[in-house]
Amino acid sequence: MRDIFKDKALQKEFERKGYVQMPLLDVKEISALFDVFQQNEKEYNQPFHTSHFSNEEGYKRVVNESIIRIVFPKLDGILNNCIPIFGNLMVKQAMHDYFMPLHADWAYVNEDEYRSIAVWIPLVNTDETNGCLGVIEGTHKISNKIRGAQIHQTGYIHDKEWVKRYGKLLPTKAGYAIIYDHALMHYSPANKTSAPRPALNLSVVPAGAAIIHYCIPEGGNEIEVYRVDNSDFYLSYNKGERPKTKSMIRTMPADTVKWVDEKMETFDPGRKKNFLARIFG
Ligand SMILES: O=C(O)CCC(=O)C(=O)O
């Protein structure tokens, strides 16, 4: 598997935990992205808004272009030959009860061969009160590798229990990045404060890796697998619909639904430690 990071120690930490954290944007960069957030306020009419699921292509393009232009160069010295695919805004509205359930992001590459990453950066300081990101370390190793639009991961039965048992909230300052494996299970608590919580998320893949998209389009009953040529695929894509590109590679039976509880029931975060303790007493 090709390394995501140039630095070996960072790569090791990423492989072990499924994420790493670092300061990334300066005040000017945060302010430029905050302007983009403010200029598009009319778009945020859900408790949790992501430009990813908007049908306003012009708006999605502005957000994507700004994030790639401002954020990606900051990753250049850190990442090992990677390219950006698309950037999104993630807005948690103020005073809402909306808890982002435990999930892993869509898959963007064949995860048997490559790993891809999300670069999540809040544009305000975040903590438990306004919806900082939470993760379950190590879950990138157990997530189903076929993930995408309308491919359900969870029946929402025990997910709060897994969060309570294994979840780790990551309070993060504005401009700091959590760079996580798209397969890592994560969540975010409600924003109970009186101000919205804007964040951005930039998806990045290893250069040269085939980019793929899995989905079950509305009315479909099997998983369709698409070749993705560039960001336009996601920018012109309306949630739920069949992708407009004619790039379907194959179909697969939709027998992979609701795997989160099943995987978490046997999840053992201390597996390696216990193993070493057994050997070395
Ligand atoms: O921004 C958030 O609160 C959640 C982000 C998230 O779950 C995601 O980017 O997949």
Image: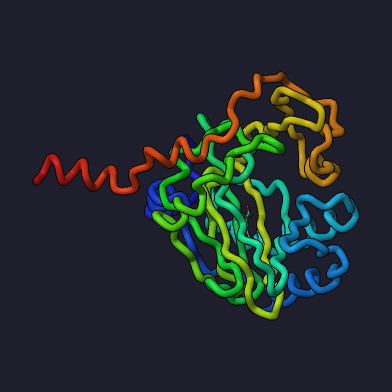
Q: Position of residue 95 (x, y in %)?
A: 69, 74
**In the picture shown, does residue 70 fall above or below 54?**
below
> Can residue 69 be seen from the camera position used here?
no
Residue sitting at the far left: 281
Q: Residue at x 53, y 53 (%)?
A: 186
**In the picture shown, does residue 150 fall above or below 78?**
above
Q: Position of residue 197 (x, y in %)?
A: 67, 71
**Quadrant of the rendered image holding ligand 1:** bottom right
**In the picture shown, does residue 60 fall above or below 264?**
below
Q: Position of residue 82 (x, y in %)?
A: 60, 46
Q: Quadrant of residue 219?
A: top right
Depth check, front residue: 274 or 262? 262
Depth check, front residue: 177 or 269? 269
Tally of numbered discs: 0
Q: Position of residue 257 (x, y in %)?
A: 60, 31
Q: Residue at x 74, y 34 (%)?
A: 228
> Can residue 38 be seen from the camera position used here?
yes
Q: Residue at x 86, y 43 (%)?
A: 236
Depth check, front residue: 212 or 219? 219
Q: Is residue 165 left or right of residue 2?
A: left
Depth check, front residue: 232 or 126? 126
Residue sitting at the far front: 157
Q: Is residue 19 left or right of residue 275?
A: right
Q: Quadrant of residue 199?
A: bottom right
Q: Is residue 13 left or right of residue 207?
A: left
Q: How is the image coloured?
A: rainbow
Q: Residue at x 66, y 62 (%)?
A: 98
